[in-house]
Image (cartoon, rainbow, N blue to C red):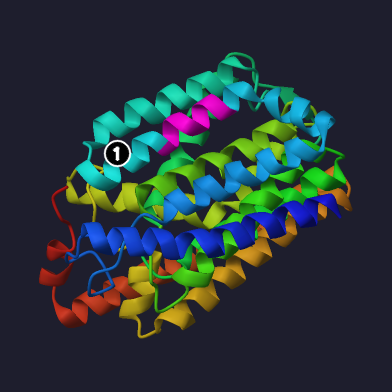
Amino acid sequence: MALLFAGLVACLFNIVLIPLIIFTAKKMDWYDQVNERKIHKGKIPRLGGIGIFVSFVASLIAVSVFSLSSAKDILGFWPIIIALVIVFAAGLVDDFKDLKASIKFVFHLAAAIIVCAAGYRFSFVYIPWFGNLGLGGFSWLLTLVWIVGVINAMNMIDGMDGLSGGIGIISAFSIGVILLGRGMHTPALAAIVLLGALTGYLFYNFPPAKIFMGDSGSNLLGFILAILPLMGARDHGSLWFWNGITVLLLPVFDVFAAMIRRSRKGVDIMSPDNWHIHHKLLRLGLGTRGILAVVYAWSMGLGAVAISSLYLPALAHWVLTIVSWSLLTVFFVILHFMKEHHLNEKGKTEEESAFCQP
């Protein structure tokens, strides 16, 4: 009940806060830049991340005020809190100044190092017939790549009304259920509060959007979603490696597809383009809500696979996980060939123009 109350507080707080942010942004002429990569048109503020951050933090503080034990537990995660502030602050500056990718990478890496140094790492991974395999020093590299990768994955997929917010809600719910099932109250609380804050944001971001979360929001969202499985992995086994990736597999695959696509074209893998999953589905004729239905369905299915770890034997869960990964791989391959067919009909000029300079 306390968890649901905290999530409700975060939701209501953000519902009240975001209109104030929209009003201020319009008054100060703070709008998202419109370019060839953006689906939206018109002037729309991009500071929704402020509402997500403030409502998330304020709700955790409110819980702490009414529960001394919760306050101690939350403060015990102080390295994560420091890293979270770093990631949010870097994203907020980027919303105003358009930081270089290399500078953002430094801040993201610094936050990831703080988390790893505090002991939140994938130290073991479950391998069928071998059990839990210790990763040793490789756990540092794997975890750093995981945190920085998820931050950027959520940033890259934040390209359409309701997309990243909806994925975030489904992912936070899935991870929260697993954390709660494992008896990890404080991390579960963080997941539910994030879910509530995102729900309040989605109230204004669902098509047609009145506000975007911006880099401050997408970076914050990616960081929290990357950290929650690590909080579970430290005390509750190696299956979190599979669960963490599975819940966020769609944005993770989207990043890998982008890296492959850009490498083939000989451009910087961090350079933006308009061939992400939502762009491909849009070119295939789906409307905004149709695209959201496809992405949400995949996210819910992957979340259900992760949650099944609470009920299935480790081997059965691993097999189900690999099946879900394979199906999503097939989906991305089909999208790729449909894109190639589309380009053959339209001509290669469209693909070349899709790769834009940062």
Depth check, front residue: 64 or 140 = 64
Depth check, front residue: 337 or 12 = 12
The three-letter amino acid code for the residue at tag 1 is Val
Q: Is residue 50 above or below residue 81?
A: below
Residue 301 seen in this snapshot: yes
Q: Is residue 111 above or below residue 90?
A: above
Residue at point 42% right, 22% down? 110
Residue 22's x, y, as percent? 37, 63
Residue 322's x, y, as percent? 67, 52
Q: Is residue 302 above or below residue 313?
A: below
Which SS class for mark 1? helix
User: How many other residues sit within 10 Å of disc 1, few (<14), some (14-19) or many (≥20)?
Assistant: some
Q: Give the residue at mark 1.
A: 93
Residue 123's x, y, as percent? 68, 23
Residue 98 seen in this snapshot: no
Predominant SS along the magenta part: helix
- Magenta stretch contains residue 85: yes
Left or right of residue 204: residue 26: left
